[in-house]
Structures are given as C-alpha cells and as structure tokens.
Amino acid sequence: MKNVSSVISEHKTLREKIVEVLREAIIRQKIRPGERITELEVAERFGISRTPIREAFRQLESEGFLTIMPRKGAVVSSIEEKDIRDFYEIKGVLEGYAARQAVARMTEKDILRLEQFNKEIKLCAERQDVTGMTRAHNAFHELILEVCDNRKIKQVVGGLVRQFLRFRFYVASLVHVEEILRDHTDIVAAIRSGDGERAEACMKLNAQLGLEVLLKEFTSGTKNKIN
Amino acid sequence: MRINTLESSIAEHQPLPDKIANFVREAIIVGKLKPGEKISEAKLADELHISRTPIREAIRMLESEGFVSIIPRRGTIVSEFSLEDLYEYFQIKACLEAFAAASVVDSLSERDLTKLKRLNEEEMSAVKSGDFSNYLRIHDDFHQTFLARTGNRKLALVIQQLGFHIRRLEKIFNDHPEIFITCSETHGDLITAFESRDSNRVRKIVEQNILHIAENIKQYEDGIAGNDVT
C-alpha cells in the first residue's frame, strides 16, 4: 500500500481511489481474510477524513470483499472453495447456453462490439487499470446475454454475479490478460462461424479459467504469500 | 394482505428478510398481490411490527428474483409478467435442471430411488382423483428429492427460484390436468433412466419435459389473459 498515490490517476474520486487500493490489497493478500481494518487506521495512513473511507468500506462490502461490523470496523471476508466451484458451475451452464442461443441472432455490429470490448480489455491491462478491465470484461459477457433470445437469463446470471462480484475482480487482477483474450477470441470466432455448440464449449472453458485461477489462489494463496 | 401466515412462520429458523420475502412472494404467486399493485414498506413494517431494514432487504431480494420492481419516486410494485417471460423462465429451468439431474445420476441411493417411485405413484393417484393441490406438493417433493443430491446448493436454489415464477401459472395448470398426466408419466421414464445411471438420457428427459410444458402453455394464452395477467 505504499506507492499508491503515484499509481492511481488523478480524475477519480477519493472514494474510488480508496476502494481500488483496498481491493487490490485484499486480492494481493496484503490484507488477509479475517483481518480487521478500521476507518481510523485508513484515515491516518492516507491523511484524509473518515467519510470517503466509510463510503469505500460500504462499496467493498457490496462487492463481497468486506464484512462491516458495527463499531468494530470491517473484516476481510473469507472465500469458500465450495462457493467458487458452485458459482462457476452455474455460470458455465447458463452462459454456455446463452452463447449457443446468441449465435443465430448476432449481427455484424454486435460482433464488432465484442471485438471492441476485447481491445479495451487489452488496453486497460496495459495501463494496469483493473476497474476498466473488469468493466470491459463484464460488457463482453453481458452483450452475449443480451443478444440471446432470453431476456431473463441476464437477470438470473446478474443476480448470481452480484452475489459473487468479488470473483470478477480476482479474475481481472490475477489472470493473464492473454488467457482471457484467447478465450474471448475463440468465443467471437465461434459466433462468427455460426457454430453454436462451439460457442457454448468456448464459453464453458472461459468459466473454467476463472474457476482454476480462483481455486489456485484459494488453495495455495491462503497458505503462502503471493508475488 | 393477511399476516398471520408470516407470524406462524417466524418460529422457523430463517433470517427475517428471507421470511418476509417468502411471505410476500407467496402472496404474489397466489395472486393476493396483483401485478402493478403497490407494496408499501411502511405499511408492512407497521402490520408486522418490525423495522423497515429487513423489509427493505426482502424487497431487494424479490427485485433480484424479478417479482417486484422498485421504481424511483413511485416505490415498489408487483412486476407485471407475460407469457413470454414465463416461457423464458421455463427455458432457463430446463437448461439448469437437466444439468443438475444429469449430475446426480451417480449419487442417487437406493433409498432415493425408492422414494422417487413412491412419490411417482402418489402423484399418479392424486391426478386420478383430481386432487391437484396435493399433486403439486408431491410433484415438488419429487424434484426436491433428486435436486437435494446435487452438491451445488446454489444451483438447487436457483432452480427453486425459477420454479416460483412458474407457480404463477398454477391456476391455469389446474384447468389443464393433461399436463399433470404427462408429467407423471415422464417422471416414470426419469426413474428408469436414473436406475440405469444414464446421464445423457436423464438430461434429455428433463429438458424435453420442461420445454414440452412450456410449448403447451403457449396455447393457454387466452386463459392467462382472462386471469388479468398481461
């Protein structure tokens, strides 16, 4: 948490900056599950008032990173291996289904947008902009859910992703961008060739990638320090 | 809206927001709360003698499930639903439940299979005697029996939630008991496929059965329109 001010860009609000720093510290296990952080501690460290910190804590709670305890500050939430497996299993099934259904309905414009999101992922990765990368990553997956002939599937997957929002940040932060882009490029290629079954299989592989990264992080990361 | 059902369910061990959500959801499913009707947090809090915080959380749960819409400046209203919406829920349920059923093929015990057979016989006789509310309860038990074997509790929960939406059609189903007959027969085929541990066949049977019902309900559009559901 040292060279923070030099890393983050100028135009973000104080709350956003604090969120990013703390989120990254949790993902990199500089603050560990079960560890407590207080508003006061963060306020002193950054030399700022407690209000934006309180807001940042609340955002991190809604993303699943923190559990706020009244009067006690916040505790870094733990991640259960079971949750990781269950989440990616359902995600793979639903997104795979959506990709298969979406193939017939994808317009050239949609496909170009998917490719544009992939470019954005790459650009954000080069700038080490995890938030931007997560946003582009989400947009890629959401477009496929929107194009598929079932409007409710976005609601169902969305409800699930919201509960496990934290995983998205881990994936954006820890997976090599080349791997994400490889999967995404395969998905676009399958869609372009009109091959629904292949699109489904590629989408499931993409979910598998998230699963493996998080499991590795979970099983080794809790014992040994990363880096 | 009556509240005594909620008070009796409070005794069960469940977080308060979940109980409130169950209670309000049930009122929506059975049509006590109609599409477009306003749900007042303040009124609920007043009637149930509880604070607004758990109510707000329950409302948010129901919003993410798609049962209510929170509209700025207007408050919370019961979501409208169309046949198309329900058809889409059927499709998602078919996809997830077929996957879940196929994945439990090797974990079903002899006791599970015996239970499934008993429930199948019970649902058959409920259909014959025209006891539809009992039929639906047994039918649900049948599904829960094999879903309980999936190691993925979240998956079983999502499938159950999709089932809540489909229950809004109960009144229509009651006018078309042929659906119940088809379902019971299909459950018999499913048991056979479970016994032979044939996951591909299990997947196909479950998927096709749900999609078959979904296709069927398309014909009942008039019935749905007649029930003030648009």
Image (cartoon, coloured by chain):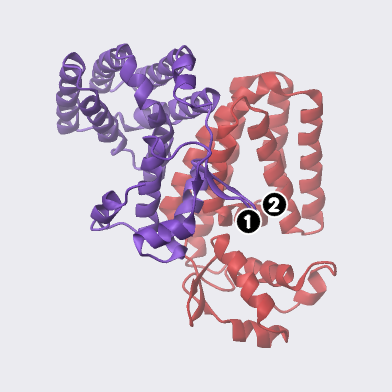
Chain colours: A red, B purple
Q: Mark 1 lies on which chain?
A: A
Residue at figure coordinates x 28%, y 23% from the top left: B197
Q: Distance between the residues labelled 2 and 1?
A: 7 Å
Element on which disc 2 rests: helix
Q: Is residue A3 left or right of residue A37?
A: right
- Compared with B201, A159 (above or below) is below
Residue A198 seen anywhere in this rendered image of the structure: no
Residue B151 seen anywhere in this rendered image of the structure: yes
Q: Residue A143 at x, y = what percent?
A: 70, 36
Q: To which residue does mark 1 refer? A: A169
Residue at figure coordinates x 23%, y 25% from the top left: B135
Q: Is residue A192 left or right of residue A221?
A: right
Callout 1, which amino acid? Phe
Q: In this view, does A12 lie to the left or right of B196?
A: right
Are dots 2 and 1 in contact, CB under 8 Å? Answer: yes
> Are labels 2 and 1 on one chain?
yes
Q: Quadrant of the C terminus of chain B?
A: top right
Q: Residue furthest right?
A: A10
Name which quarter of the figure residue B178 lies in: top left
Viewer-nearest residue: A162 or B8:
B8
Q: In this view, does A58 lie to the left or right of B205?
A: right
Q: To which residue does mark 2 refer? A: A134
Q: Residue A138, which numbered label? A: none
Q: Residue B148 at x, y = what percent?
A: 29, 39
- The crowd level at tag 2 (other Cα within 10 Å; few <14, some 14-19, many 20+) is many
